[in-house]
Amino acid sequence: MASSTTEIVHDFSPLMRVYKDGRVERLTGNDVVPASVDPITGVQSKDIKIASEIGIGARLYLTKTADPHHKLPLLVYFHGGGFIIESAFSPLYHNYLNSLAAEANIVVVSVNYRLAPEHHLPAAYDDSWVAVKWVASHSGGDGQEPWLKDHVDFQRVFFSGDSAGGNIAHNMGMRVGSEKLDGISLVGLVLAHAFFWGEKPIGNETNSPKKSYVENLWRFVNPSTVGSDDPLFNPAANPKLSSLGCNRVLVCVAEKDLLKDRGWYYKEVLVKSGWKGKVEVMEAKGEEHVFHLFNPTCENAVAKLKKLASFFNQDKA
């Protein structure tokens, strides 16, 4: 009989395993890189604490051409990893956001939220909202962070994230719509391969061998959930979807990603909800989930980067 130190009670390979004795083994996403001046783009980054008593922080990015006389759009970014792995200090996200900040000429706040199972949902949502409010606290020239006070146009704020981070970005957009944030205008969302689901399978979900994996992962990170039709997980189940607090949404999907159909469905239900904004979908042909992080120089990743840069720099609708 296996001992409690080797018996696996939750197996979410290739991301994580949890053992009977409570030990958590993260199989990937553990690497971190220091903040720096990127030698390729010249983008500066630095780490800040937002609520150190509970471990909320962020990595900030500022382009080398930033000028206090020319305010820039702000992107608040939420990393992916199924709510259980990765961080704002991961090389995947550090390299990606250096490139995005340089391409789009924006300021970026990459949020580091607490992970499950040490901190089950809604911890990641609560932490992200604390970070969003911290950002907003700088809008009137207050706050302690000079990169935000000196360089950000708080009337051009965007939220984005990939996978679980795309889920967070949507839910933060919903909170802006219901609770408001004084001093900032949330112009748009970019949801990349967002981690959405539902009780009733759609498209390629029906016969996917990964269906139970997705559903079990959601229940693992959010034990108090009502299930796959939880409005946090299935935006179509939210009767208040029309109150999404921005006026533009870009949904990015990948042809070979299990979550692709949920991205297209998100557009459909958002339009039908009565929301007054504009939503569009960009599909990357032949690509897998979060391909742009793992293969950032491929043709589709470069096209996605340019599309995002354009999205962030459109005139405010």
Image (cartoon, helix red, strand yellow):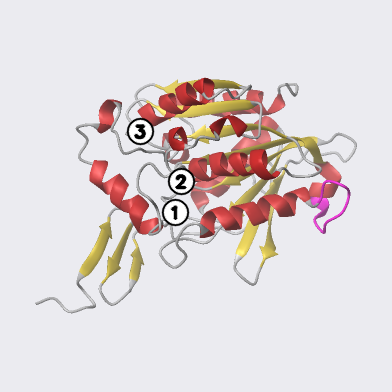
Q: Nearer the viewer, residue 267 or 208?
A: 267
Secondary-structure class at tag 1: loop
Label 1: few (<14), some (14–19) or many (≥20) C-alpha neighbours in 10 Å: many
Give the labeled residue for mark 1.
83
| Observer able to see residue 208 | yes
**Badge 1 amino acid:** Phe
| Observer able to see residue 35 | no
Q: Nearer the viewer, mark 1 or mark 3?
A: 1
Q: Which comes before the other along the chain, label 1 or label 2?
A: 1
Residue drawn at point x = 23 percent, y = 31 percent: 206
Residue drawn at point x = 25 percent, y = 73 percent: 20
Label 2: few (<14), some (14–19) or many (≥20) C-alpha neighbours in 10 Å: many
Residue drawn at point x = 73 percent, y = 50 percent: 135
Q: Nearer the viewer, residue 302 or 284?
A: 284
Give the labeled residue for mark 2.
164
- The region drawn magenta spans 138-147
Q: What's the mark number on residue 194?
A: none
Give the labeled residue for mark 3.
288
